[in-house]
Amino acid sequence: MRRSEFMIENQEEVEQFLAEMSFGFLGTVDESGCPRVTPLNFVFLENAFYFHGSRFGEKMDHLFRNPKVSFTVADEYALIPSYFSDPVMACPATAFFKSVTASGDAVIVQDIEEKAKVLGGFMLKLQPEGGYDPIDANDPRYSPQLKGVALIKLVPHHMSAKFKFGQNLKKRRLDNVLDGLKNRNESRDAVTAEHICKYHPSSP
């Protein structure tokens, strides 16, 4: 069971996180009930997750047999060593991160206009600098690719977000962790400290 203090209900924050991320993990089930997780790129548009790839393969076989899927996106900000807050015990060791988990029924998109719009969304996310002609369903150069690519759509029946940044910490331990991040000063320690201050219940 997820701890309530880590849960994020603000849809705008969740969508901002999803916009910043390009990679996630799609869970499917084979005919024997064995789960499979596929790492892939995604885009989140109009309250739906989209994935693209080949029309054939194990992932597509699973979806045709059983459309029920789960999808997870996660970003680890910092590992928090135990000695930040306890000189002896290992128990305080943890990680601070953001994650979103969604589940529902996947459908295969057939509409060419929708495919063009979504693949355009992929390009904006993955190649924001441009350098290509816009994807247009009426452009004969793109028509064969749009027809040939498989596009999977997941409109979540359930979606939850967990942003864990020490919301459960008492002031003494919280201060120790903040001091530890400041002294370590690795690549994402400063932004992790900002998130701790933003999400902790004691923040104004």
Image (spheres, rainbow, N blue to C red):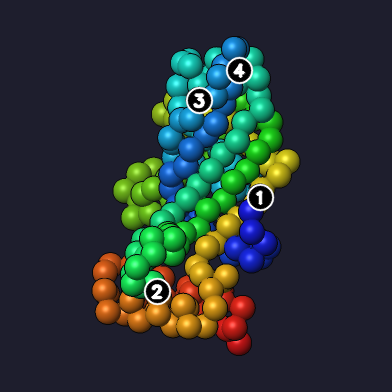
Secondary structure at badge 1 equals loop
Disc on the earlier residue, 1 or 3: 1
Residue 15 on image: x %, y %: 58, 58
Residue type, numbered disc 3: Arg
Q: Which residue is mark 4?
A: 33
Label 1 or label 4, whichever comes before in sequence order: 1
Amino acid type shown at disc 4: Gly
Q: Are marks 1 and 4 in contact (CB under 8 Å)?
A: no
Q: Confirm or deny contact between disc 2 and disc 3 (CB under 8 A).
A: no
Residue 169 pos. (x, y %) = 53, 73
* Mark number displayed over residue 36: 3
Q: Residues within 10 Å of mark 2 (few under 14, many from 20)?
A: many
User: What residue sits 43% from the left and 54% below the top?
Assistant: 75
Q: Which mark is residue 1?
A: 1
Mark 1 vs mark 4: in front = 1
Left or right, 130 with reference to 51 = left
Which is more toward the observer, 152 or 138? 152
Work out whether mark 4 precedes mark 2 in sequence or the reverse, and give the earlier one. 4
